[in-house]
């Protein structure tokens, strides 16, 4: 094959990189500024603390209602359940409990659930919220008085089934908390990306020929999607360059 073909391809690739590199660097700068601003706001206003508290209390309220629907004889109080959870998880320190991330909250709740399972009649409200999906017959058996020797095997089987249900419930909560927090961060970061680019375009329009508003919005929206990707791309390229050197 003619060597000029490969030379032409190489030239086209070089031109392509020269065109994309300034755009990638600019969008990476937007992404870095967005992430820094978002992190600062989260730290200053304790947004994750409020998010965690709202989600856990909301979850307990939903579980309490579902438990009552499952069996009308169960009527757990979500407020009492929340208090019992904080007591068992962090010795009543609500600030410490909600200051950790979603995975750690799920781990603390798993530890608290073990105590609630061991003493269900002492922490009845929390226990009932945790076992809302379990079979009512198993729940009543575990909540009942200590079993007689003849009924011990049935009690152990009911407790094991309830315990497995609690584990799956907390796994679902962890996945839900993590995904909602991640999605919230993505939405806010996208909005901040668009805002930064719109401000930059407004500054450009003040100094140069005005860009049509539709074009400005399209550039800002596209930048909102590409800024985090461009930031990761520039970081990867910089790491690759340092390795080559």
Image (tube, rainbow, N blue to C red):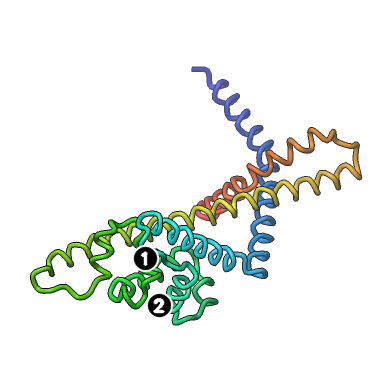
Q: For the view shown, which residue lies furthest in the bottom direction?
A: 91
The residue depicted at 69 percent of the width and 36 percent of the height is: 19
Q: Secondary structure at mark 1?
A: helix
Q: Secondary structure at mark 2?
A: helix
Residue 223 in which image quadrant? top right
The residue depicted at 28 percent of the width and 74 percent of the height is: 118
Q: Is residue 245 visible?
A: no
Q: Is residue 116 visible?
A: yes
Neighbour class for label 1 at 10 Å: few (<14), some, many (≥20)?
many
Q: For the view shown, which residue lies furthest in the front direction?
A: 73
Tell me where residue 172 appears, x and y as whole percent.
40, 55
Q: Earlier in the sequence, mark 2 or mark 1?
A: 2
Tell me where residue 164 appears, x and y as whole percent.
27, 60
Tell me where residue 103 appears, x and y as whole percent.
44, 63
Residue toward you, 33 or 1: 33
* 62 left or right, relative to 162: right
Report the residue marked by disc 1.
128
* 203 left or right, relative to 153: right
Neighbour class for label 2 at 10 Å: few (<14), some, many (≥20)?
many
Tell me where residue 230 appears, x and y as whole percent.
62, 46
Mark number, residue 143? none
Report the residue marked by disc 2.
88
**Answer yes or no: do the residues labelled 2 and 1 have beta carbons within 8 Å?**
no
The residue depicted at 63 percent of the width and 65 percent of the height is: 42
Q: Is residue 94 above or below residue 31?
A: below
* 141 left or right, relative to 217: left
Q: Is residue 235 above or below residue 41?
A: above
Report the Cα–Cα distance between label 2 and label 1. 15 Å
Residue toward you, 12 or 214: 214
Residue toward you, 102 or 34: 102
């Amino acid at each position: 094959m003619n060597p000029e073909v490969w030379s032409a391809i190489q030239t086209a690739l070089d031109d392509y990189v020269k065109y994309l590199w300034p755009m990638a660097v600019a969008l990476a700068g937007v992404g870095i500024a967005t992430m820094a601003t978002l992190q600062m706001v989260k730290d200053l206003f304790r947004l994750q603390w409020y998010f965690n508290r709202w989600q856990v209390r909301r979850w307990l309220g939903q579980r309490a209602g579902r438990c009552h629907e499952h069996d009308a004889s169960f009527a757990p109080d979500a407020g009492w359940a929340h208090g019992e959870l904080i007591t068992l998880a962090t010795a009543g320190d609500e600030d410490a409990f909600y200051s950790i991330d979603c995975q750690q909250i799920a781990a603390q709740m798993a530890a608290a659930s073990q105590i609630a399972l061991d003493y269900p009649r002492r922490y009845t409200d929390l226990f009932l919220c945790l076992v809302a999906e379990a079979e009512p017959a198993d729940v009543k058996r575990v909540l009942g008085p200590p079993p007689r020797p003849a009924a011990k095997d049935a009690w152990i089987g009911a407790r094991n089934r309830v315990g497995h249900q609690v584990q799956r419930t907390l796994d679902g909560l962890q996945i839900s908390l993590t995904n909602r927090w991640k999605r919230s961060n993505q939405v806010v970061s996208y909005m901040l990306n668009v805002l930064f680019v719109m401000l930059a375009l407004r500054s450009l329009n003040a100094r140069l020929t005005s860009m049509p508003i539709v074009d400005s919005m399209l550039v800002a929206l596209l930048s909102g999607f590409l800024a985090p990707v461009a930031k990761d791309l520039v970081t990867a390229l910089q790491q690759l360059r340092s390795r080559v050197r």
